[in-house]
Amino acid sequence: MLVDNAVYVNGQRTADPQSLDETYEVLRERNGMAWIGLYRPDVAEIRSVATEFELHELPVPDAISAHQRPEVGAVRSDPVRGVAPGAVPR
């Protein structure tokens, strides 16, 4: 479930998209940064985010498995991209 969703440009919140697809579109148009808050995301939501942001494939199955805490860290090939699955307490 999408609980908070925003696009920031130059440190300012410039959009509050209503869906992941809308977020991706606005993000490309404005060349900004997205804040995507998901609570108990389903497989489709996790795969959508992973695909859109070209996340490394290793932590994705951990994020999908409810019984396993995802491992997230910098991937040597892309140390800039940051993702924090499980950041919202259950």
Image (spheres, rainbow, N blue to C red):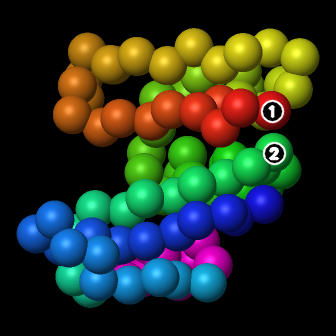
- Residue 57 in percent (x, y) is at 56, 28
| Circle 1: element type | loop
Q: Name the foreground residue: 11 vs 45.
A: 11
Tell me the residue at 43%/71% (across/down).
6
Residue 70 occupies quadrant: top right
The numbered mark, 1 or 2, whose residue comes first in the sequence reads 2
CA neighbours of label 1 inside 10 A, class few (<14), some (14 to 19), many (20+): few
CA neighbours of label 2 inside 10 A, class few (<14), some (14 to 19), many (20+): some
* Residues at discs 1 and 2 in contact (Cβ within 8 Å): yes
Query: Label for residue 44?
Result: none
Query: Label for residue 40?
Result: 2
The dominant secondary structure in magenta is helix
Tell me the residue at 20%/73% (across/down).
12
For the N terminus, the quadrant is bottom right
- Residue 28 in percent (x, y) is at 30, 77
Inspect the magenta stretch and tell me whether residue 20 lies in it: yes
Name the mark nearer the viewer: 1 or 2: 1
Q: Furthest residue to the left?
A: 10
The residue range painted magenta reads 19-28
What type is the residue that disc 2 sits on? Answer: Arg
Tell me the residue at 48%/76% (across/down).
23
Inspect the magenta stretch and tell me whether residue 71 lies in it: no
Does the rendering let one see residue 67? yes
Residue 4 occupies quadrant: bottom right
- Residue 18 in percent (x, y) is at 61, 84
Q: Which residue is mark 1?
A: 90
Q: Furthest residue to the right?
A: 67
